[in-house]
Amino acid sequence: MLPFPVRNPRLLDEFTPYLVATPFNLPALDRAPFGVPVPPENIIDPLKLESEVFLRLLHRLDGLTFGPEGMPMPRWVFFDCSEMPGAIYGLARPAATLWPKARELFKVPHDYDGLVPVSMYVAIPMHRPGIWFGHNLSSLAPVFERAGVTDTDLRGLGSLTKGLALKCFGVQEFWGATQWLSKALFIHVKFGPLDLQTAFTPAHSEHETLTYGFRVTDAALRASMGDASVVLPRPPASFWLEGHDVPAMRALQDRIEAGERFVIPDVPRATPDGGVLVPITRV
Ligand SMILES: CC(C)(COP(=O)(O)OP(=O)(O)OC[C@H]1O[C@@H](n2cnc3c(N)ncnc32)[C@H](O)[C@@H]1OP(=O)(O)O)[C@@H](O)C(=O)NCCC(=O)NCCS
């Protein structure tokens, strides 16, 4: 149990934390972030044969969540850019207690009695200690929503997973990339104002990607998981960017490249047509 209130405390009763890390990276990680222990048997070594089925299920979780977004990860990218250099933290459930629909979605082998992941957060350490780049956030919540599964309440799963993962990895400064229209933006801003590094990113396969960063403090992590007693400073918006507005993204990118600094201070506003208005503050 966490020592502060979270959005959906039942998640930690329903699921157990797991951690994928090589023996090289494992000693640097916090195996009990905020006092929530990762049981030793839930620590997965990607260099061992015995990890094969769990890692296949993790890759399946990526396919189920990022597939519909058009960005599923090839298996070799998973190994080269996640399991080997970085770490993966998430929540899981023993196969024996999995809901039938989830068994079917994951294609869990009949004779498998290990863990099945329901969420994952992957990050990769950058050059300076304490600085990490976020690589993947997946939650089964939208998959269940699409499949009409109501067996359990997964509200808050993505936010809780990212918050605990950043604590587990010991991240002090975080960088990430996401799309203006991604639902994940609603999660990322929970950590506080996001410092914009790019607003339009042709280097990424999705040009309408923004690159953002924030300082990781316990207050930011607690706020992200739903501790309403933490109030982060959020400056008012200078203007709003519509999530489909490519000329506005390019114009903002030009201003960033010219040396101006901007943050996304707070949550976007959803628009009735399925778009978003994202607040931008010049700092
Ligand atoms: C993005 C993803 C991880 C979110 O997982 P999740 O378990 O639904 O996340 P959470 O429930 O913790 O948080 C979602 C938040 O977005 C908010 N949100 C989402 N869409 C919203 C909308 N249209 N309007 C307002 N709020 C919205 C939710 O209300 C919730 O915030 P709250 O807890 O304050 O209510 C999940 O949808 C996923 O795996 N997507 C596919 C992969 C992906 O895009 N990953 C992110 C890449 S950067």
Image (spheres, rainbow, N blue to C red):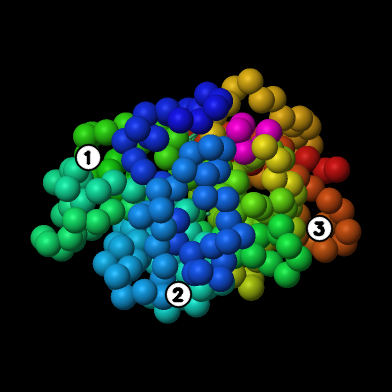
Asked whether residue 67 is in view, the answer is no
Viewed as shown, does residue 212 lie left or right of 5?
right
Earlier along the polypeptide chain: callout 3 or callout 1? 1
By secondary structure, the bulk of the magenta-drawn segment is best described as: helix
Residue 8 figure quarter: top left
Is 268 or 132 nearer to us in this picture? 132
In the rendered structure, find residue 205 and report the number of the disc placed on it.
none
Cα distance in 3D space between marks 2 and 3 = 34 Å
Percent coordinates x, y for residue 143 in the rendering? 30, 48
State the mark number for residue 256: 3
Q: Residues within 10 Å of mark 1 (few under 14, many from 20)?
A: few
Camera-side residue: 201 or 27?
A: 27
Q: Position of residue 5 (x, y in %)?
A: 52, 24
Q: Which residue is mark 1?
A: 148
Residue assigned mark 2:
79
Give, as a three-letter code, the residue at label 1. Answer: Gly
Q: Residue 242 or 85: which is nearer the viewer? A: 85
**114 relative to 228, above or below:** below
Residue ID at (29%, 41%): 145
Give left or right: position of 252 versus 153.
right
